[in-house]
Image: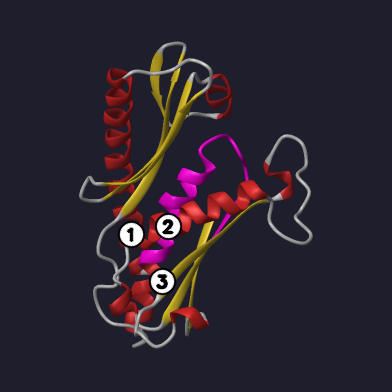
Amino acid sequence: MICTASFSEGVKDWRKGNGMGWVTAEYGMLPASTGRRKARPTIKPDSRGVEIQRLIGRSLRNAVRFDRLGENTITIDCDVIQADGGTRTAAITGGYVALSLAAEKARKNGLCGRGVIKTAVAAVSVGIVDGRALLDLCYEEDAAAEVDFNVVMTGGGKFVEIQGSSEGKPFDRTQLDRMLRLAGGGIRKLLRCQSAAIGKGRKK
């Protein structure tokens, strides 16, 4: 996964005039990212790609104080170079790092105020395979999962979004709680990795 963030002055017409900025995202899978070559979208992104980039945008907007960003836009581009399950959660987690670094660079250049980032955001997949709760499902695990969830959380431990469903075998509250605890533990590790990556990025 390659995640980049681009800062641009101005916002779309519907957002103008209130002093508030915006964060949006684009997501795509490179042709050789899957086992069989994936054709490039020629006119518009496929429906799955559109749904994923909306999820990325929604998730990352929870990290931002738009009044401090000013009437500026940060666009997160997430390109999958090798698909092996969990690409949308990887995009959110990596996208936050890119977003944070872009906001800090813009602040240093006098393009926006301080404190644009209000909280970290990270995401991970979790599911039940053969009756066991598993974290960060790979493709084979995801394909065999009885239950599959994507969980997005803030640095403060609050939920941003939970996407999940059973694949033919319903789950109960105990299993749900187990999966959410497992996801929370995984996200805390990701938050530490994000912090380290941002620290290294700021030193460059």
1 vs 3, front mark: 1
User: Residue 96 in magenta?
Assistant: yes
Q: Measured along the vertical axis of the image, is residue 151 above or below residue 108?
A: above
Q: Measured along the vertical axis of the image, is residue 29 above or below residue 34?
A: below
- The amino acid beneath tag 3 is Ala
Residue 1 visible in the snapshot: no
Between the residue at mark 1 and the residue at mark 2, the CA separation in whole angstroms equals 7 Å
Q: Are marks 3 and 2 in contact (CB under 8 Å)?
A: no
**Percent position (x, y) of residue 175?**
32, 19
Magenta-tinted stretch: 77-100
Q: Measured along the vertical axis of the image, is residue 153 above or below residue 84?
A: below
Q: Measured along the vertical axis of the image, is residue 186 above or below residue 52?
A: above
Please name the residue that numbered disc 2 is placed on: 58
Please name the residue that numbered disc 3 is placed on: 102
Residue 133 visible in the snapshot: yes
Label 1 packing within 10 angstroms: few (<14), some (14-19), many (20+): some
**Percent position (x, y) of residue 191?**
30, 48
Q: Earlier in the sequence, mark 3 or mark 2?
A: 2
Closest to the observer, 104 or 70: 70
- The amino acid beneath tag 1 is Asn
Residue 159 falls in image quadrant: top left
Between the residue at mark 1 and the residue at mark 3, the CA separation in whole angstroms equals 16 Å
- Res 62 label: 1
Label 2 packing within 10 angstroms: few (<14), some (14-19), many (20+): some
Residue at the location (46% across, 44% down)?
89
**Percent position (x, y) of residue 92?**
44, 51
**Percent position (x, y) of residue 38?**
75, 44
- The amino acid beneath tag 2 is Arg
